[in-house]
Each structure stands twice: as structure tokens, then as C-alpha cells.
Image: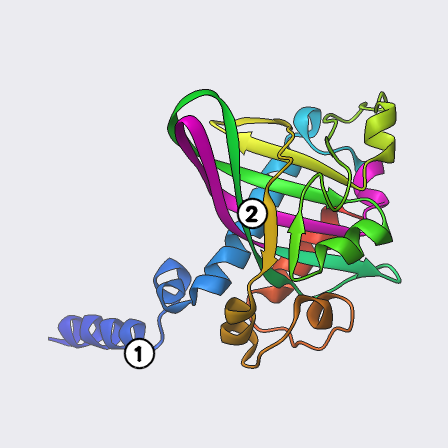
Amino acid sequence: MTRWIGTALTLALLLAFPSGPHARQQESDEAKRLREAATVFGEIMAAEDKAIPEAILGEAEGIAIFPSTIRAGFIVGGLRGRGVISARTDGRWSPPAFLTLTGGSVGLQIGGQAADVILVINDRRGLENLLRNQFTLGADAAVAAGPVGRDAKAATDIQMRAQILSYSRARGLFAGVTINGSTIRQDRDANERFYGRRLETRQIVLERAAGSPEPVPLWLETLARYAR
């Protein structure tokens, strides 16, 4: 009898105060997106021989990550994803703002896949451009496929001139890719749902007008660890 009562009390406590993965089921879509972006970045940087070079991340003005971006098509393909961006000012990373990524591509392709897309913004002008309401990669800023690997010093001239370096991971493979023509837009609705008030991307990442709800600390800790 005592044993049964103890089991019943344990179950009651778990239901009243959930923890671990089950507790996260109540997270908003935005919180899940942010947590997934932090996981993607950590996994990629853990593979040192294929990671983004530290020298590049050390100079980055901003980082945007679009986890599980969908690429699909038959002859003419499409691209759609939702992500987050943070900027670095005075050595500190800002809270994240939410973005959407859409685009098209033409080529011999068939089928579909989910890919993680990472953008490393190299200079302030590129960051300022990206923070506008609508931004087209390749048209509003020079974009190039980023080098990978610890010893990736052989960045070409175009990589050195590019305001943004782009990467993609699909089917376990991580490499620099070009996604010119894709459009990035502010996700004001997501910003409002997550922070509780309607904020522009610029207000969040440059003016730091937002707070730090969960899991913002996890995201900032991940950026600080790998993009020092």
C-alpha cells in the first residue's frame, strides 16, 4: 500500500511539474526554432575538420541560421525556411530576431530535402542591408560560398570581398553553397509572439530592445562559445 501511494505521488508531481523533453512540448514554435538553431550550430562546429573556420567567426558581425530549410522541385526548384539572426556589438551578441527565407533555383533537380542554412555576415554594411524589411542575397549584398575546415585559409578574393558567406548542411554533408536570389524578410509576427510586443529586427539586434526569454540564454551561450 505504501509503495502504491509513493508511486501515485511521483506521477502526480511529474504531471504537475513536467521536466525534460516533455516539458518542452509546451514551447512556442519560435522557442523551438531558436533551440533548433542553437543545436545545428553546435553540431556543425563540433566537427572541427568541417566546421566554419574560427578566423571567420571571430570577425563576424552577425550570424543567421535557418534550420530544416525545405528545398524541393522538379526542374524548377524552391526554397523556404524560417530562422533567427543575432548581431555582435562591442563583443556581445544580441538577442535573436526571427526571419524567413524564400527563393527559387533553376537547374536539373528532382525530389526534395531539408537543409540547414547558415549565413555569416562579414561587415556592418552587409548586416545593415540584411536587417531591412526585405533583402535579396546577391542583389543587395555580395554573397559567396564559405570555406570550411580549421585550416581553410585559402579563401578566394571573392570570399574576402563577400559581405555574407553562406553554408548548408544536408544529408550530413556540410559545405559552402551559393544561394543567390533568395529573399530574406523580417518575421514581425514571430518577434511579437516571442517577445510579447511588435518589434522590428533592427530594434532587437541593434538597439537590444528585447528581453531574454527561454531559450535565448542557450542561443547566446552557443554563439559566445563558437564565435569568439
Q: Which of marks 2 and 1 is nearer the N terminus?
A: 1
Q: Where is residue 180 in the image (x, y as percent from the top left)?
A: 65, 35
Residue at image position (54%, 80%) is 196
Front residue of 124/96: it is: 124
Q: Is the magenta stretch mostly helix, strand or loop?
A: strand
In the depicted structure, whether residue 16 falls above or below residue 131: below
Q: Nearer the viewer, residue 44 or 122?
A: 122
**Element type at marker 2?**
strand
Say which residue appears at 49% left-offset and 64% top-offset. 30
- Residue sitting nearer the eye, 102 or 190: 102
Q: Do the residues labelled 2 and 1 touch (CB within 8 Å)?
A: no
Q: Give the range drawn in magenta.
A: 55-83
Q: Name the residue under label 2.
A: 66
Q: Mark 1 points at which residue?
A: 16
Q: Residue at x 58, y 57 (%)?
A: 99
Type of amino acid under label 1: Ala
Does the segment drawn in magenta span residue 79? yes
